[in-house]
Amino acid sequence: MSETTVSGWNILDAAHEALRQAVAGVPADGWDLPTPCAGWTVTQVLQHAAGDQIGFASALTGEPGPSFDPFDPTGERVADPAAFAEDAITRSATAWAGVDRDAAEVPTPVPPHKMSPWSASTACALDAGVHAWDIAVATGRPSPLTPEMARPLLQVAREIVEPLRAWGAYAPAVEPVAGDDDVAALLRYLGRDPHWTAAS
């Protein structure tokens, strides 16, 4: 897709691109593969990730949220996964492009439901980025996360994840390992094994 909507928030645009590329890289027979999200297929992670981006957009604009429950994705095949993801990314990026960077706070769909513009946009990026990783590794591809992305994502994760973990949105944190880089530290904090494979 040659024309894409950008939000103007660097970390969010990087996470959106990671999600876009992860979805584009799924082979035709890859949509039912297991992912690091226990019990969810690649299709379910796509549905969840798209729904969350729409949810962030809805919180900002007051427009309708996702037409499905992102936390109970059906796993039914999406006719055009790239277009499905792009629609959600575009809605999110368009909403964020209109945010006043000097605002004291903006609404979010996740607790505490109001955050600084930087924290809120980075929380939105956290969701897109980590699910891009889920999809990529589920299909045997390299991590789309970079240390430059992981550092701010971990910063905001430490602000918001614990209440979500208590609700079940994140697995318990995995103990750090000596030699972890920034990406591994982020993934372990989010309850993921940085070296996850479908066979593990």
Image (cartoon, rainbow, N blue to C red):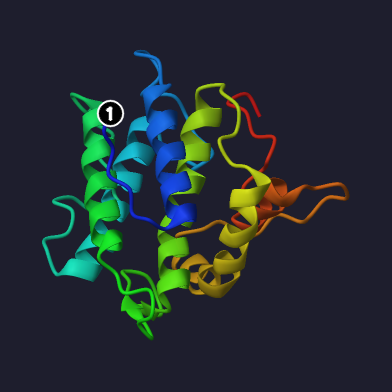
- The location of residue 12, given as percent across then percent down, is 43, 53
Q: In the rendered view of the protein, which quadrant contains the C terminus?
A: top right
Q: In the drawing, does residue 188 fall left or right of residue 34?
A: right
Specify the quadrant of the image occupied by residue 156. Answer: bottom right
Q: Residue at x 55, y 74 (%)?
A: 159
Q: Residue at x 35, y 82 (%)?
A: 103
Figure check: 13 above or below 31: below
Residue placed most toward the observer, 198 or 157: 157
Q: Residue at x 56, y 23 (%)?
A: 141
Q: Which residue lies most toward the right here?
A: 178
Residue placed most toward the observer, 164 or 56: 56
Q: In the drawing, does residue 178 fall left or right of residue 136?
A: right
Q: Is residue 67 visible?
A: yes
- The location of residue 67, given as percent across then percent down, is 13, 51
Residue placed most toward the observer, 184 or 97: 97
Figure check: 2 above or below 51: above
On the image, numbered disc 1 is attached to which residue? 82
Specify the quadrant of the image occupied by residue 32. Answer: top left
- Judged from the image, the secondary structure of the residue bearing numbered disc 1 is helix
Residue placed most toward the observer, 167 or 149: 149
Q: Which residue lies most toward the bottom here?
A: 104
Binning the other alpha carbons within 10 Å of mark 1 as few (below 14), some (14 to 19) or many (20 upward) gives some
Q: Amino acid type of disc 1?
A: Ala
Q: In the drawing, does residue 82 fall left or right of residue 104?
A: left
Q: Residue at x 65, y 57 (%)?
A: 151
Q: In the drawing, does residue 92 fall left or right of residue 63?
A: right
- The location of residue 166, given as percent across then percent down, is 50, 70
Figure check: 160 above or below 140: below
Please give the count of numbered marks on the rendered protein. Answer: 1
Q: Is residue 172 visible?
A: no
- The location of residue 198, given as percent across then percent down, is 58, 26
Q: In the rendered view of the protein, which quadrant contains the N terminus?
A: top left
